[in-house]
Image: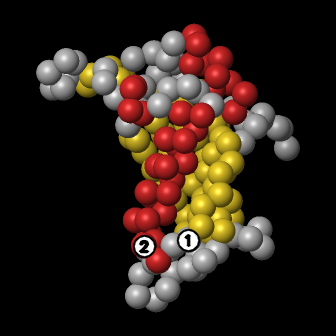
Amino acid sequence: MEFIRSEKVRFQHIDYAGIVFYPRFFEMLNGLVEDWFAEELKRPFESMHETNGIPTVDLKVSFKQPARLGEILQKKLWVNKLGSSSMNCGFKFENELGKTCLEGTVTLVNVSISPDRQTVKSEAFSDEIVSKIKPFVAEKTDN
Protein backbone atom coordinates (compact mmCIF):
# COMPACT_ATOMS: atom_id res chain seq x y z
CA MET A 1 0.00 0.00 0.00
CA GLU A 2 1.16 3.54 -0.73
CA PHE A 3 0.48 6.69 1.26
CA ILE A 4 -0.62 9.31 -1.29
CA ARG A 5 -1.20 13.03 -0.94
CA SER A 6 -1.57 15.83 -3.49
CA GLU A 7 0.25 19.13 -3.41
CA LYS A 8 -0.13 22.14 -5.66
CA VAL A 9 3.08 23.78 -6.84
CA ARG A 10 2.87 27.31 -5.50
CA PHE A 11 4.86 30.46 -6.20
CA GLN A 12 6.83 29.83 -2.99
CA HIS A 13 8.15 26.58 -4.47
CA ILE A 14 9.61 27.89 -7.72
CA ASP A 15 12.84 29.56 -8.80
CA TYR A 16 13.57 32.20 -11.43
CA ALA A 17 13.17 29.59 -14.20
CA GLY A 18 9.59 28.92 -13.06
CA ILE A 19 10.23 25.36 -11.89
CA VAL A 20 10.35 23.83 -8.42
CA PHE A 21 13.64 24.78 -6.73
CA TYR A 22 15.16 21.47 -5.61
CA PRO A 23 15.21 22.17 -1.82
CA ARG A 24 11.44 22.76 -1.98
CA PHE A 25 11.04 19.14 -3.14
CA PHE A 26 12.79 18.06 0.09
CA GLU A 27 10.35 20.17 2.11
CA MET A 28 7.45 18.55 0.24
CA LEU A 29 8.91 15.11 0.98
CA ASN A 30 9.30 15.92 4.66
CA GLY A 31 5.67 17.11 4.71
CA LEU A 32 4.61 13.79 3.17
CA VAL A 33 6.52 11.83 5.84
CA GLU A 34 5.08 14.04 8.58
CA ASP A 35 1.51 13.55 7.27
CA TRP A 36 2.03 9.77 7.05
CA PHE A 37 3.22 9.63 10.66
CA ALA A 38 0.27 11.73 11.88
CA GLU A 39 -2.51 10.23 9.79
CA GLU A 40 -1.58 6.56 9.42
CA LEU A 41 0.85 5.79 12.24
CA LYS A 42 -0.96 8.03 14.76
CA ARG A 43 2.42 9.41 15.80
CA PRO A 44 2.30 13.16 15.05
CA PHE A 45 5.61 14.97 15.09
CA GLU A 46 4.38 17.56 17.60
CA SER A 47 3.95 14.91 20.29
CA MET A 48 6.63 12.46 19.18
CA HIS A 49 9.47 14.96 19.24
CA GLU A 50 9.18 15.50 22.99
CA THR A 51 11.18 12.32 23.68
CA ASN A 52 11.67 10.64 20.29
CA GLY A 53 12.51 11.47 16.72
CA ILE A 54 12.68 9.98 13.26
CA PRO A 55 15.65 11.65 11.55
CA THR A 56 16.60 11.09 7.93
CA VAL A 57 19.98 9.34 7.79
CA ASP A 58 20.17 8.67 4.06
CA LEU A 59 18.46 10.26 1.07
CA LYS A 60 18.82 9.32 -2.58
CA VAL A 61 16.98 11.37 -5.18
CA SER A 62 16.61 11.43 -8.95
CA PHE A 63 15.13 14.53 -10.54
CA LYS A 64 13.33 13.27 -13.65
CA GLN A 65 11.36 16.24 -14.94
CA PRO A 66 10.65 19.82 -13.87
CA ALA A 67 7.49 20.59 -11.92
CA ARG A 68 5.94 23.94 -12.75
CA LEU A 69 3.83 26.58 -11.04
CA GLY A 70 0.19 25.50 -10.76
CA GLU A 71 0.76 21.78 -11.33
CA ILE A 72 -0.76 19.31 -8.90
CA LEU A 73 1.74 16.68 -7.79
CA GLN A 74 0.76 13.24 -6.54
CA LYS A 75 3.25 12.41 -3.79
CA LYS A 76 3.56 8.68 -3.00
CA LEU A 77 5.39 6.97 -0.13
CA TRP A 78 5.86 3.30 0.73
CA VAL A 79 8.26 1.16 2.78
CA ASN A 80 10.91 -0.90 0.97
CA LYS A 81 12.47 -2.43 4.08
CA LEU A 82 11.50 -2.35 7.74
CA GLY A 83 14.20 -3.00 10.33
CA SER A 84 13.98 -3.06 14.12
CA SER A 85 14.71 0.68 14.46
CA SER A 86 14.90 1.94 10.88
CA MET A 87 13.03 1.83 7.61
CA ASN A 88 13.91 2.52 4.02
CA CYS A 89 11.05 4.22 2.19
CA GLY A 90 10.55 4.76 -1.50
CA PHE A 91 8.87 7.87 -2.83
CA LYS A 92 7.69 9.27 -6.14
CA PHE A 93 6.18 12.60 -7.15
CA GLU A 94 4.15 12.57 -10.37
CA ASN A 95 2.53 15.41 -12.30
CA GLU A 96 -1.05 15.43 -13.58
CA LEU A 97 0.02 13.58 -16.74
CA GLY A 98 1.48 10.74 -14.63
CA LYS A 99 5.06 11.71 -15.47
CA THR A 100 7.59 11.28 -12.68
CA CYS A 101 9.18 14.53 -11.52
CA LEU A 102 11.10 13.13 -8.56
CA GLU A 103 11.78 9.69 -7.13
CA GLY A 104 14.11 8.11 -4.64
CA THR A 105 14.57 6.52 -1.25
CA VAL A 106 14.84 7.87 2.26
CA THR A 107 16.09 5.98 5.32
CA LEU A 108 14.51 7.01 8.62
CA VAL A 109 15.73 5.90 12.06
CA ASN A 110 13.62 5.78 15.20
CA VAL A 111 15.55 7.47 18.01
CA SER A 112 15.15 8.35 21.67
CA ILE A 113 16.23 11.79 22.82
CA SER A 114 17.49 12.40 26.35
CA PRO A 115 15.69 15.03 28.47
CA ASP A 116 18.67 17.42 28.12
CA ARG A 117 18.51 16.80 24.30
CA GLN A 118 22.24 16.01 24.25
CA THR A 119 21.98 12.27 23.60
CA VAL A 120 20.24 10.73 20.62
CA LYS A 121 20.31 6.95 20.10
CA SER A 122 18.46 4.47 17.95
CA GLU A 123 15.55 2.68 19.57
CA ALA A 124 13.46 -0.22 18.33
CA PHE A 125 10.01 0.57 16.98
CA SER A 126 7.20 -0.48 19.30
CA ASP A 127 5.06 -3.45 18.26
CA GLU A 128 2.15 -1.04 17.85
CA ILE A 129 4.04 1.15 15.37
CA VAL A 130 5.39 -1.88 13.49
CA SER A 131 1.81 -3.15 13.02
CA LYS A 132 0.83 0.25 11.55
CA ILE A 133 3.88 0.40 9.24
CA LYS A 134 3.53 -3.16 7.88
CA PRO A 135 0.63 -2.44 5.48
CA PHE A 136 2.91 0.04 3.68
CA VAL A 137 5.75 -2.45 3.14
CA ALA A 138 6.05 -3.07 -0.61
CA GLU A 139 5.67 -6.67 -1.66
CA LYS A 140 8.76 -8.09 -3.27
CA THR A 141 8.45 -9.93 -6.56
CA ASP A 142 11.05 -12.23 -8.07
CA ASN A 143 11.81 -11.59 -11.74
In percent of the image, x 34 and y 29: which residue is there?
49
Depth check, front residue: 111 or 75: 75
Compared to 104, does 118 lie above or below? Answer: above
- What count of labels does the image hold? 2
Depth check, front residue: 112 or 49: 49
User: Which secondary structure, mark 2?
Assistant: helix
Q: Tell me the quadrant of the picture where the C terminus can be found.
A: top right
Name the residue at the top extreme.
127
Compared to 102, does 12 lie above or below? Answer: below
Q: Which residue is mark 1?
A: 9
Proximity of marks 2 and 1: CB atoms separated by less than 8 Å:
no
Depth check, front residue: 99 or 47: 47
Q: Is residue 121 visible?
A: no
Picture quarter containing residue 104?
A: bottom right
Residue type at tag 1? Val
Q: Is residue 17 left or right of residue 73?
A: left
Counting from the top left corner in percent of width and height, residue 125 is at 49, 17
Q: Residues within 10 Å of mark 1 (few under 14, many from 20)?
A: many
Q: Residues within 10 Å of mark 2 (few under 14, many from 20)?
A: few
Separation (CA) of disc 2 from disc 1? 8 Å
Q: Which residue is mark 2?
A: 12
Picture quarter containing residue 75?
A: bottom right
Compared to 16, does 34 lie above or below? Answer: above
In percent of the image, x 48 and y 63: which residue is there?
25
Residue type at tag 2? Gln
User: Which secondary structure, mark 1?
Assistant: loop
Q: Is residue 83 left or right of residue 122?
A: right
Counting from the top left corner in percent of width and height, residue 140 is at 77, 35
Counting from the top left corner in percent of width and height, residue 80 is at 64, 37
In percent of the image, x 65 and y 57: which residue is there?
6
